[in-house]
Amino acid sequence: MKASQFFIATLKEAPADAEVVSHQLMMRAGMIKRLGAGIYNYMPMGLRVIRKVEAIIREEMVRAGAVELLMPVVQPAELWQETGRFDTMGPELMRVKDRHERDFIIQPTSEEVVTDIARQELRSYKQLPKNFFHIQTKFRDERRPRFGIMRGREFTMKDAYSFDRDAASAGKSYEGMFAAYKRIFDRFGLSYRAVAADTGAIGGDRSHEFQVIAKTGEDAIIYCPSSDYAANIELAEAVAPATPRGAAAQALTKTPTPGKSTCADVAALLGLDLKQTVKSLVLATDTLDEHGVLKQTTVWLLLLRGDHDMNEVKVGKLEGLKAGFRFATVAEIEAHFGSKPGYLGPIGLKQPVKVIADRSVAAMSDWVCGANEADFHYTGANWGRDLPEPDLVADIRNVVEGDPSPDGLGVLAIERGIEVGHVFYLGTKYSQAMNATFLDETGKPALFEMGCYGIGVTRILGAAIEQNHDERGIIWPASIAPFQAVICPIGMDRSAEVKAAAEALYAELQAAGVDVLLDDRGERPGAMFADWELIGAPQRVVISDRGLKAGTVEVQGRREAAATATPLAEAAALVKVRLAA
């Protein structure tokens, strides 16, 4: 490709609404152009990156035994009504009607459609296992689209769906996709972690996220530097304290704490370590009768150490809270505790509540909690002596840096990541809802065991830039760069020698399989170099009259501070070696 034949449009400054680095640099590098809120044109430079990402994904999916098809963007509502998601998904699901007033959706995902294909086409266990995948446009009607393509409304994803005869076979399919994903992300050239994750709204009971490591990442990744343990913040286990609960050494004392309603303020007033305080969180669950009328409300008191935060995902998995919970109202709190929030605790309740203590709280002695009276807290509180043991002891908190690793092989550390891939074991969630069955060895119908596996194709671009950039622009990994190498001839229009050398090197690199661009625009050297540093070409070769007189050209990697003078005859080989490194 020659620059004069291509489309290059760079900007010196990013638009004012570009919030994050990837958004700013993609706009400046001419890779995307905003069309509407969360909707972008992918310009030729950006599209080249997308096609390279897709090619790697395609090759590894086929290598793993998956079969490509293509499912539509617009899907009939009937399939989504079978699973109930037409009604249960929020406004992010865009619902539309055709001219006949029939309901359709613009797909954010395709579980329903692929399950419909399977129940029609996969009739026998002899056809299993099967894994279908597609790379397709999706739409999610975000309330507040932001961060460019990182949180856009229209985006591209690779989705794969496996169908198996039983759970054991489904596990093998899951492992096969997990291995394929590792190969894919290795080939992308990105630093990433595969972390155990919560399955969330999509369902299932086994899940891993693939997170690209970046300081600007929106997710907290928990890992153990001395082992293979990794999980996201929602799933990372906070293990119980290794030491047993100490014996009571203080008397229970009602202590004035005027105007101090937070654990931090109380600890500072009393001169105590925040870890000696206990915070109270009050939740409520509602039971409805068959007519949807409120039948009963249960109030729950969750106790956490003052320096810890509640993990809502973990709480939502506890018995009694699985069907959903809410934070209790002020009226409910006053009825059960006799006090407004800020001074709540488990001692001296007006009405019974269900008490759940975090593992760390259950191991505490001589702790501080609210006295259920404004401006007072109890000090020296102890289980068994001052109040009954909790109804339930559970892991209900977020882990913190330095916590013991659940595998016992070290302590936990935290880094930030951007989720770009996710693998789920779905089980029969969708096949059961849609009565998708096949005939097993006995001739009886059996439900498909399913898995689903997604990669955010366009999101990869943003994540790669967030991880790889400097003050000059993007630093693409060679495998997904729009061009692997760029030849920058100085004065090509004025020097026959420079032009001939540039054309010859261009042909040599092309013949060697390098995705190379020859910048024949006639730009000034400073402007030309700035463009390619901004765009992020991994290797740059500068050809000039002065260099040719010395028999050399300058080869410089995007991460290198200085160029390497190289004989013209060796330049192509050097570029190829560097790209392969």
Image (tube, grey):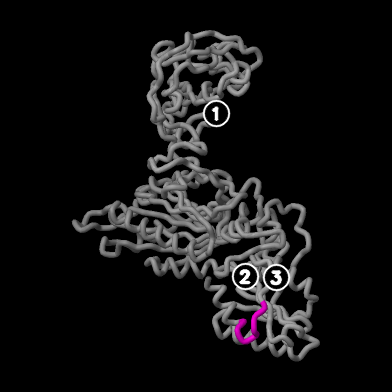
Give the left or right position of residue 549, taking residue 274 as reference.
right
Q: In this view, does 83 lie above or below 39?
A: above
Say which quarter of the image contains residue 38. bottom right
Q: Which residue lies furthest to the left in this view?
A: 442
**Residue at (71, 61) in percent of width and height:** 27
Sooner in the amino-acid sequence: mark 3 or mark 2: 3
Q: Which amino acid does label 1 sit on?
A: Asp
Q: Position of residue 273 (x, y in %)?
A: 56, 23
CA gap, disc 3 to disc 2? 9 Å
**Residue at (77, 64) in percent of width and height:** 11
Q: Answer yes or no: is residue 174 visible.
A: yes
**Residue at (44, 37) in percent of width and height:** 404
Seen from the viewer's position, the closer of residues 339 and 235 is 235
Sooner in the amino-acid sequence: mark 2 or mark 1: 1
Seen from the viewer's position, the closer of residues 116 and 235 is 235
Q: Which residues fall within the magenta stretch?
A: 565-571
The residue tagged 1 is: 307
Q: What element carries label 3?
A: helix
Q: Is mark 1 on a helix, strand or loop?
A: loop
Q: Where is residue 286 in the image (x, y as percent from the top left)?
A: 47, 26
Q: Which mark is residue 532?
A: 3
Q: Is residue 152 above or below residue 280?
A: below
Is residue 396 located in the magenta-colored stretch of the structure? no
Q: Residue 538 carries which label?
A: 2
